[in-house]
Image (tube, rainbow, N blue to C red):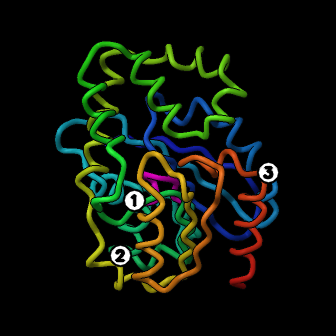
Amino acid sequence: FELEYFTFGHGSRNMAIIPGVSMTSIMLSAGAIAGGFEIFTDRYTVYVFDQQKNIDENYSVAVAADNIATAMKQIGIKDVDVFGASHGGMVAQYLAIHYPELIHALYLGGTKSRNNPSSPDTINRWMELAKGNDVCALNHDIYQSLYSDEFYEKFAGLFAEMEKNGGPKEMERFYHMVRSAAEFDCYDDLDKITCPVFAIGSKVDKVLGGYATQEIADKLGCYIYMYEGYGHAFYDEAADFRPTMLENLSALD
């Protein structure tokens, strides 16, 4: 497999960021991500992992996690604090279960350990849209589902431009990523996670539902915080999210 990543920061500790699904490569957002996590650079050397280049019907969350574990070993990093957002949070849980020697702590943002009846139907809707040929319709639904109405309206012009990105190849790739999220279930193995876990969610999450985060925290008995007024991607909307994450992870020392 081929897997790209970028790195920033000069700290003595290692952090891995595993983003959620997207229509385009995370490498295109390297500058914005590094800028957004600037406060982490004294404490951490940060590695941001993209999805593998070739994604097909054999792709799964387990495959994604195995690839990142292989990459970590080749880079030579361990004892890593992992921030997993959405789909990336599923990958992070799998890593902690199957590669505990690599993981120091998990910071889970808006993710799930399994499907539950109260989850919105967003993932299935995205899968259906991804089978079509209207990339603008798919992207429009994605962004409106990820963010609060206020945030979407504030940046409506930017989103309108971003919604044009992608084509048939990207839509097929996106379909398999979202399918892997729909199929993911590690709930029965959560008790194998031995590292500290922070579960952060949104009560009005329109993608996975706030209950998904609550379920993880209930099973693990770990730290939990639920935002109000922000969407699924609260980690982009909430100004206090990153400073609080740095404070919480630093307190583990």
Instruction: Please tell me the numbered disc located at residue 91.
Output: 1
Q: Is residue 27 highlighted in magenta? A: no
The residue singled out by tag 2 in the image is 97
Q: Is residue 115 visible?
A: no
Q: Would you say 115 lies left or right of 237 here? A: left
Chain-order first, disc 1 or disc 3:
3
Q: Is residue 189 above or below residue 11?
A: below
Which circle marks residue 38 in the picture?
3
Q: Splitting the image into 4 quarters, where does residue 147 fall?
A: top right
10 Å crowding of disc 2: few (<14), some (14-19), many (20+)? some
Query: Could you tell me how far apart the alpha carbons at marks 2 and 3 are, in whole angstroms?
Result: 29 Å
Looking at the rendered structure, the secondary structure element under dot 3 is: helix
What quarter of the picture does the N terminus occupy? top left
Q: Earlier in the sequence, mark 2 or mark 3?
A: 3
Binning the other alpha carbons within 10 Å of mark 3 as few (below 14), some (14 to 19) or many (20 upward) gives: some
**What amino acid is found at the position of numbered circle 2 in the picture?**
Ile
Relative to 205, does residue 76 appear above or below in the rendering? below
Q: Residue at x 56, y 34 (%)?
A: 27
Q: Which label belongs to residue 76?
A: none
Sooner in the amino-acid sequence: mark 2 or mark 1: 1
Residue at the spot x=33%, y=33% of the render? 126
Q: Give the position of the C terminus as an image quadrant.
A: bottom right
Q: Is 48 positioned to the left or the right of 175 in the image? A: right
Whether the residues at callouts 2 and 1 have beta carbons within 8 Å, the answer is no
Three-letter amino acid code at disc 1? Val
- Residue 148, percent from left and from top: 61, 40
The quarter holding residue 176 reads top left
Q: Which residues are magenta?
A: 84-90
